Structures are given as C-alpha cells and as structure tokens.
Amino acid sequence: MADLLAHVLVAYALMTALSWRIERIKPRWTAVVMGGAVIPDLVKIQLLLKAHVVEETVGIPFDYAAVSTLGGVLLIAGVISIAFQRRYWRRAYGCLVVGGIMSLVVNGLRAFADSHSTAWLYPLTWWRPPTPSLYVTSDYRVTALVVAVAALVTAIGMSVLDRFRPRREG
Amino acid sequence: MDRSGRAILVLVFISAILALLVHYGGTNSVHEQYPQPSEIEGDYDAHVGDRALLWGEVKSISLEDQRANISVLTANGTMRMTVDGFDTSVQSGGNIQVYGTLRSGQTIDADAVVVVNSSGASRLYKYATSAIGALLVVSYFFRHWWFDPDSLAFEVRGDG
C-alpha cells in the first residue's frame, strides 16, 4: 500500500494543475477527489479488525483486499456521496471515483517481485496488470518527490496564475 | 430525497460492499497464480518445482552466500524459508517479496527480490506519513465543506 499522504498529494497536485485549464474544477471538488484518493487505503481497517477474525466469527470467507480494487472504489464512493446534499450526489460520486482510481493507478506502479501488480481491476477481471515496479512504499524519496510536486503546484497556483485570473474561485 | 430514502441507499451500498468483500474472499484463491503459503506449508514436497511469490520477514542474511532466512506468514503461524540467490541489502526485521522456484529443503531459488520495508522502522515511517495524509485531507475538506446537522449532509461553505 502506497502511503496515504502520497495518494492525497497526487490527487491534490493533479486536480489543482487541471483546474488551471478547466474552470469547473474548483478547490471544493479537488477536496472531494482527495477524499476519494483515500478509499483504497481503507483496506487498513484490517489492522483494527483482522479478516480471519471476521471469517471465524461469521463463518464465511472475507477479504479486505477488495477495498483496494475498482469494485471497492465504485461502491465505497457510493456510500460516501450520500453524505452530501442531494444536489451534489452525482458530482461528489464522480470526484470520489476519480480520486479512488488515481490511487489505484499509483498503487499499480508499485514494485512486485514477479512484475505484476495486484488484481486491482476486480471484479472486472482477476488479471494482474504488469507493473513497472517504480517504487516501494517505504521509500521516503517517493514521499519527498510527491511533497515537492504538490508544493510546486501550490506555489504556481498562488503566484503566477492569479495574475492572469483575477477572479478568485471558490 | 427524504431521510428514510437516504438510509435505505446507505444500507444498499453497505450490503453491496460487504458482499464484495465476501465474494473476493471466497473466490480469490481460485484465481491465485501461485500456491499460497498455507498450501505450501501443508504439503511442501508436492510444491517442489512450483513458481511462488512469497512475502516474508528477514531473520538472518548472508550476502557472501547470497542466502537469507525469512519467515513467511501462514494461516497457522509462520513458515521458515531459505532464499537462495539473495543479493539485496536489507536488515533483519525488514520485509521482502521473493519470486522464484520452490526447491526441496524449504528453499526458494530467487529470480527477483523486492525489499518492501528495509527494516522494522520503515513500517513506523509509513504509518506516520499516512497519519499526516489523513490530517491533510480532513483539514482541506473542511475548509471547503461543512456538515449541516439539520439535513445531515455536507454542504459547501459560503466562502469555499
């Protein structure tokens, strides 16, 4: 699992950079995309309640790994979007799914010894997409790089672009 | 939509999420490419010659011999394995992935080794950065949204 900080910052940096071009991407929706980017990390619930404990208690198979998949993102985004006002549901759902998929893609670049990522496209397929094995999550250089990019994007957004776009958008 | 309608939708989604976790748990073993640690431990000799992808904690390492001893989590506890062809620097206590061929004598001939955590301390690093990430997303979110207790729903902040 790539760390949550990297997921949140990748979503922030991408959406903020896109917002320079696309007027409709406002910071409030960037915030929702960042929230969506956390969805695959909810798999960490297993640290609190182990899957095998659930299996033994309820007597049926159970695996949190599905949270870090396309199916998990699509469903968890659904329940979260209902927490918004009715008129925001569709937009919130779209943003949450975009954020979740961003994190799945970022996770899909992690190193695996057999050069294939997890089956994160489940339930569409059990195929494990090939990974370029770019990084391992405990590598602090990954975090440093993402923090630097996010800081750069923030700086550009604050200084240069505001000059050309005086109207402040909420 | 009224409150009961929302409550029903929440229940539908939560049921679907639980169903997904159960479906995954019930079917992933069929789709595994490699034998799982518990299967290997159950009948090691039957799996000699099989390809395997194992995750383990490094117990000891000898770079001269290109060997490491790792302990692999199984359903019943842990299984000791020797990794042959180990040429990566890692401290004992670190976590690795190894991909290779199972040989007799609880040994895996490594084709590739990936260091997941180079020492026990890097796990702490991951949790610490994740906590910062959680704080960041929560604070950024509530700068732009607030929770309206009357409608029990998130609403855009006036200035957001």
Image (cartoon, coloured by chain):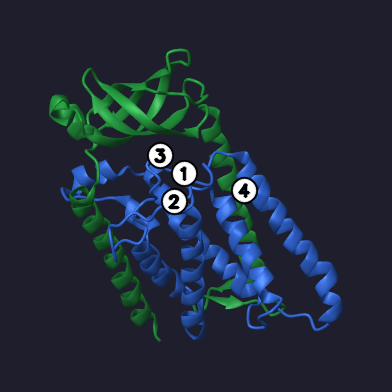
Chain colours: A blue, B green
Indicate left or right for A79 with A170 as reference: left
Q: Are marks 4 and 3 on the same chain?
A: no
- Of badges 4 and 3, the one in the foreground is 3
Q: Look at 63% across and 74% down and name the residue there.
A: A28
Q: Type of residue at label 2?
A: Thr
Disc 4 secondary structure class = helix
Q: Nearer the viewer, residue A21 or A73?
A: A21
| Viewer-side label of 4, 1 | 1
Element type where label 2 sits in the image: loop
> Where is mark 4, residue-wise?
B132
Evaluate whether residue A128 shows in this view: yes
Q: Are marks 3 and 1 on the same chain?
A: yes
The answer to whether mark 3 and mark 1 are in CB contact below 8 A is yes
Q: Amino acid at mark 4?
A: Ile
Q: Using the numbered discs, state the Cα–Cα distance from disc 2 to disc 3 in whole angstroms.
A: 10 Å
Residue at image x 44%, y 30%? B95
